[in-house]
Image: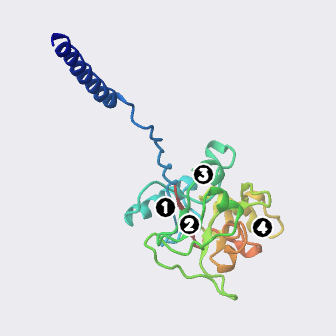
């Protein structure tokens, strides 16, 4: 009898330990491995592009003065960020020329007008492809008049050319580094040119003309057409007025 009771007690204890051990083992089993997928990186931010609502003669105060004008208009329109003008000219202290190729942030994201329309998908597209939408809107999103077949229309100072190999180069016509905005006969820099028998000096020519491009829809149809057109109409006198292209950096 005692042996039977002892045997039953051992069975009960073993059963209890087995159940407890099984429960403990179940608790300790590792959970199935779940692969954690990282979210994709956010897309590059867009950059705003506009053409100025104001017009200026060739005396912009240099390239930095043109940048300042873009920044002031952007701030008045409550546009975010820092802006620079798409314009080229001599560097400081007679240094090498400077322009968008040297000073611009080369955006990996799209360039957009104020209305959200994409102008170019990124910097590379901007200088190598036709524009997706022309830069015809000012800082408030208002449409700037463009030219017709027989009308030069609204010019924009650029002083910048995009060559066939997509190099961005400054034009020699830059109103003496965008510091001259007067007529030829009013400029002391061109006094020698008043003598009919004397040829124009390069300094005089630079003081009287600037590279500009008229806002024409067709200029957006081929690479670089919006900054340097195919004809001599792209040169105008420095006393005349034109707008600026402004790009967020």
Which residue is the site of mark 4?
195
- Foreground residue, 110 or 199? 110
Mark 3 to mark 2: distance in Å? 19 Å
Residue 35's spot in the image, x, y percent?
48, 41
In the displayed structure, would residue 178 be above or below residue 97? below
Color theme of the render:
rainbow
Q: Which mark is residue 106?
A: 3
The residue at 77%/67% (across/down) is 195
Mark 3 to mark 1: distance in Å? 18 Å
Q: Secondary structure at mark 4?
A: loop
Q: Is residue 106 visible?
A: yes
Residue 73's spot in the image, x, y percent?
43, 64
Q: Which mark is residue 70?
A: 1
Q: Is residue 31 left or right of residue 186?
A: left
The residue at 55%/56% (across/down) is 109
Q: Is residue 159 visible?
A: no
Q: Is residue 50 left or right of residue 140?
A: right
- Foreground residue, 215 or 208? 215
């Amino acid at each position: 009898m005692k042996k039977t009771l002892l045997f039953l007690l051992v069975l009960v204890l073993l059963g209890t330990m087995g159940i407890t051990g099984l429960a403990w083992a179940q608790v300790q089993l590792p959970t199935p491995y779940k692969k954690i997928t990282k979210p994709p990186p956010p897309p590059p931010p867009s950059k705003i592009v506009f053409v100025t609502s104001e017009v200026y003669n060739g005396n912009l105060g240099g390239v930095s003065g043109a940048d300042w004008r873009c920044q002031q208009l952007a701030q008045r329109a409550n546009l975010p960020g820092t802006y620079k003008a798409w314009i080229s000219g001599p560097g400081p202290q007679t240094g090498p020329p400077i322009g968008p190729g040297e000073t611009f942030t080369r955006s990996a994201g799209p360039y957009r007008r104020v209305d959200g329309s994409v102008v170019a998908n990124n910097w590379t597209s901007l200088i190598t492809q036709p524009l997706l939408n022309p830069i015809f809107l000012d800082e408030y999103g208002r449409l700037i008049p463009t030219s017709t077949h027989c009308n030069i229309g609204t010019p924009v100072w650029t002083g910048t050319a995009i060559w066939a190999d997509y190099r961005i180069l400054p034009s020699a016509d830059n109103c003496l580094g965008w510091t001259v905005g007067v007529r030829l006969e009013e400029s002391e820099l061109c006094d020698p040119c008043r003598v009919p028998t004397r040829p124009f000096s390069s300094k005089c020519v630079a003081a009287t003309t600037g590279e500009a491009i008229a806002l024409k829809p067709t200029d957006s149809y081929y690479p670089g057409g919006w900054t340097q057109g195919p004809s001599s109409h792209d040169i105008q006198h420095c006393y005349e007025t034109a707008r600026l292209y402004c790009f967020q950096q």
